[in-house]
Image (spheres, rainbow, N blue to C red):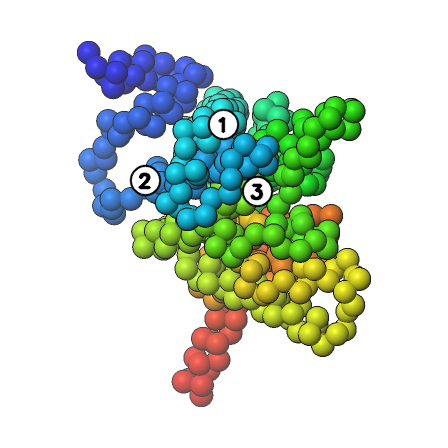
């Protein structure tokens, strides 16, 4: 008897028990359901919620693998144990076993905790509410480890996941009913509850915090930098990374957010598979470029002096904002969340444009937290239903006007 048959027997055995959703979740996660419909009219399609989620997971896997190598690379580079790569993706110094070992050791536990704790909460609510476990957390569980610093304490991540799943999702009724993106809700909780672990210039590279503490304690050690490009610019420092490094991802940052080229390819893949909305992605990029151009215009018009704390990010080339920080990752994987985003085509253009516009606005005017895409997406999650409401009402008024003209 195979594993599939054993799980199916357990599923039938505990069919009327409270624990049934747990067996159903394991069975349907690994295999196709045994039950099929036999009557009535049904739409036949190759896609369902599980396949949709798996497609997004496929798009995230390259970012995860690159993030593991980059975590090790940034650690060894900051410690002075290796030289910076000079030939991009083809550098053996980046794709080394030492870098992967550090990356696996630091990133894999984040993935395990995210899925383990998140699915436990999902199953608990399914048992309490007596409904099936939903597949929505498949993507959230992968997103969470990719948007946090590599040295985030595991207990801290577990607390944030519990909060995000319960408050950001289950209280609204579960998958398909939530107003806020669950992964960003988890990230927001971490930022506001434990700000010292989510910002600053030492948390983005493995070992940088410990090295800084040892130096402060009197140990004679060289400083170990761990600040991001945005963090440096927010402090008025000069840009020390090349455009190619920022585009390819050889920079400090959250685990999966650094490689703009992989995120771009993932976005094209999601558009090709019709999972992600190209309207939201394009309009968000346009909104960011418009806001960046406005700030560049303010600087060129000498309306603000170089001594201002806003000058460095204002003077950053407008298109550089697309390849630094978590903007690209947020736009491709979170702004396009079909549950929390606008549903109408016109609404998607407005929704995406405002996300891009507000992201750069927050990035420049909030030096304490220059990464604004998280707050911009959460804000627009709240206003997405309102945007759709006015778009629909506008269409209704246009049709009523045309009807009146025809009957006049």
Image quadrant where residue 91 sits: top left
Q: Residues within 10 Å of mark 2 (few under 14, many from 20)?
A: few
Judge whether residue 8 can be spotted in this image: yes
Q: Position of residue 14 (x, y in %)?
A: 36, 14
Q: Nearer the viewer, residue 74 or 273?
A: 74
> What's the residue at 63%, 39% (across, down)?
226
Dot label at residue 102: 1
Q: Quadrant of residue 134?
A: top left
Give me the disc on residue 253.
3
Q: Quadrant of residue 6?
A: top left
Q: Residue at x 41, y 33 (%)?
A: 96
Image location (x, y in percent) of residue 407: 42, 84
Q: Secondary structure at mark 2?
A: helix
At 79% from the left and 61% from the top, the residue drawn is 308
In the structure shown, which secondary structural element does the residue marked by tag 3 occupy?
loop
Q: Position of residue 168 (x, y in %)?
A: 58, 38
- All told, the count of numbered labels is 3
The C terminus, quarter of image: bottom left
Tell which tag, 2 or 1, sits nearer the viewer. 1
Is the residue 183 above or below the residue 106 in the image? below
In screen coordinates, is 366 left or right of 73? right
Q: Nearer the viewer, residue 288 or 348?
A: 288
Q: Nearer the viewer, residue 61 or 379?
A: 61
Foreground tag (3 vs 1)? 1
The circle drawn on residue 281 is none
* Residues packed near mark 3 inside 10 Å, few (<14), some (14 to 19) or many (20 plus): many
The residue that label 2 is drawn on is 51
Say whether marks 2 and 1 touch (CB < 8 Å). no
Identify the mark nearer the N-term, 2 or 1.
2
Q: Position of residue 93 (x, y in %)?
A: 43, 38
In what element is the residue under mark 1? helix
């Amino acid at each position: 008897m195979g594993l599939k048959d054993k799980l199916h027997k357990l599923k039938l055995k505990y069919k009327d028990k409270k624990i049934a959703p747990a067996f159903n979740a394991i069975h349907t996660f690994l295999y196709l359901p045994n039950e099929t419909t036999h009557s009535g009219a049904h739409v036949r399609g190759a896609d369902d919620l599980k396949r949709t989620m798996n497609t997004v997971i496929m798009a995230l896997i390259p970012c995860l693998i690159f993030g593991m190598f980059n975590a090790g690379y940034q650690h060894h580079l900051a410690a002075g144990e290796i030289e910076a790569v000079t030939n991009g993706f083809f550098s053996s110094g980046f794709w080394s076993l030492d870098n992967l070992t550090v990356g696996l050791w630091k990133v894999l536990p984040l993935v395990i905790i995210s899925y383990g704790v998140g699915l436990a909460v999902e199953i608990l609510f399914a048992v309490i509410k007596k409904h099936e476990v939903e597949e929505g957390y498949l993507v959230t569980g992968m997103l969470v480890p990719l948007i946090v610093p590599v040295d985030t304490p595991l207990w801290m991540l577990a607390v944030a996941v519990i909060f995000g799943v319960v408050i950001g999702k289950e209280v609204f009724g579960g998958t398909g009913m939530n107003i806020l993106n669950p992964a960003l809700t988890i990230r927001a909780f971490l930022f506001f509850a434990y700000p010292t672990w989510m910002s600053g210039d030492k948390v983005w590279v493995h070992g940088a915090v410990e090295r800084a503490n040892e130096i402060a304690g009197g140990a004679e050690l060289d400083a170990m930098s761990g600040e991001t490009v945005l963090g440096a610019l927010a402090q008025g420092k000069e840009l020390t990374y090349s455009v190619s490094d920022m585009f390819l991802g050889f920079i400090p940052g959250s685990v999966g957010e650094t490689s703009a080229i992989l995120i771009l390819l993932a976005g094209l893949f999601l558009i090709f598979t019709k999972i992600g909305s190209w309207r939201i992605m394009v309009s968000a990029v346009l909104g960011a470029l418009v806001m960046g151009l406005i700030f560049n215009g303010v600087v060129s018009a000498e309306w603000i002096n170089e001594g201002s704390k806003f000058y460095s990010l204002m003077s950053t080339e407008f298109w550089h904002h697309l390849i630094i920080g978590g903007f690209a990752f947020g736009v491709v994987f979170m702004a396009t969340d079909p549950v929390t985003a606008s549903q109408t085509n016109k609404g998607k253009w407005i929704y995406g444009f405002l996300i891009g516009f507000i992201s750069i606005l927050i990035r420049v005017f909030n030096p304490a937290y220059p990464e604004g895409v998280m707050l911009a997406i959460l804000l627009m999650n709240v206003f997405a239903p309102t945007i759709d409401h006015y778009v629909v009402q506008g269409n209704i008024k246009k049709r009523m006007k045309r009807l009146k003209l025809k009957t006049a």
